[in-house]
Amino acid sequence: MPIPDITDKGHLPPGIHACTVSELARRFGTASTQRKRLMKCLIGYLARLRDLGGVGGVLIDGSFTSDRPQPHDVDVVVPMPAPPDRRWLEGFARLMRESKDRYHVHTLPDSPGAPGTWADFLQRVKPIDQQMLGITDPNYRKGLLWLPLERNA
């Protein structure tokens, strides 16, 4: 299923939309030099995360998945494996320390099944943004992208 069109409010429509890395790159990673740079960094980040193992996929959000021409970074929700082992936690901690400066990724670790997850939070539009965009529905939601991670064969 292709990534849906951006709404007139500049977001993905509500829901979790599955995509591949190549679909993400075609849709959001080529329109500007900044977007190309962020996409290249995201691919490097995802490779590091894939090498850790234990993560079936990530959620992609933020200005990168909007109509903003110059996004600052990419928000990535990482569902934590249950239970994570010490090796995984140490590798993930190293990746998190590097994620913002090296990969321009804002990493948001998540515990699947826990109440109040990042996925729930990120689908909400901040009140200041609702006001700016003329959104009057307090329950307005935006969409996120689900990007499966597969280990290289």
Image: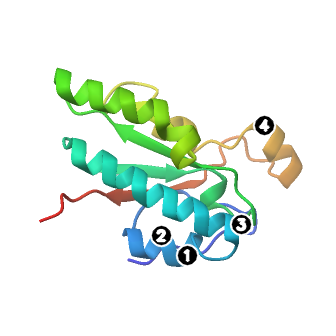
Q: Which residue is mark 4?
A: 127
Q: Earlier in the sequence, mark 3 or mark 4?
A: 3
Label tally: 4
Q: Which one is in front, 45 or 110?
A: 45
Is residue 148 left or right of 26 when viewed as pictured? left
| Amino acid type of the residue tagged 4 in the rendering | Pro
Quarter holding the C terminus is: bottom left
Asked if the residue under mark 1 is in contact with the one under mark 3, i.e. CB atoms within 8 Å, the reply is: no
Q: Which residue is at the front of the view, 89 or 3? A: 89
Q: Does residue 13 appear in the picture of this structure?
A: no
Is residue 29 in view? yes
Marks 2/1 in contact by CB < 8 Å: the verdict is yes
Question: Viewer-proximal residue, 54 or 120?
Answer: 54
User: Residue 34, image x and y in percent?
Assistant: 68, 64
Task: Tell me which amino acid carries mark 1.
Answer: Arg
Q: Where does label 2 land, which residue?
A: 24
Q: Indicate which disc, 4 or 1, sits on the residue closer to the N terminus.
A: 1
Label 2 is placed on what type of residue?
A: Leu
* Mark 3 residue element: loop
Contact check, label 2 and label 3, Cβ < 8 Å: no
Answer few, some or many: residues within 10 Å of disc 3's Cα (few below 14, many 20 plus, some between 14 and 19).
Answer: some
Secondary element at image label 2: helix
Identify the image quadrant of residue 11: bottom right
State how far apart marks 4 and 1 are (Cα).
27 Å
Compared across the picture, whether 79 is left or right of 126 comes to left
Query: How far apart are the alpha carbons under marks 4 and 2?
Result: 27 Å
At a point 75% along the width and 61% down the height, the residue shown is: 70
Between circles 3 and 4, the one closer to the viewer is: 3
Circle 3 residue = 67
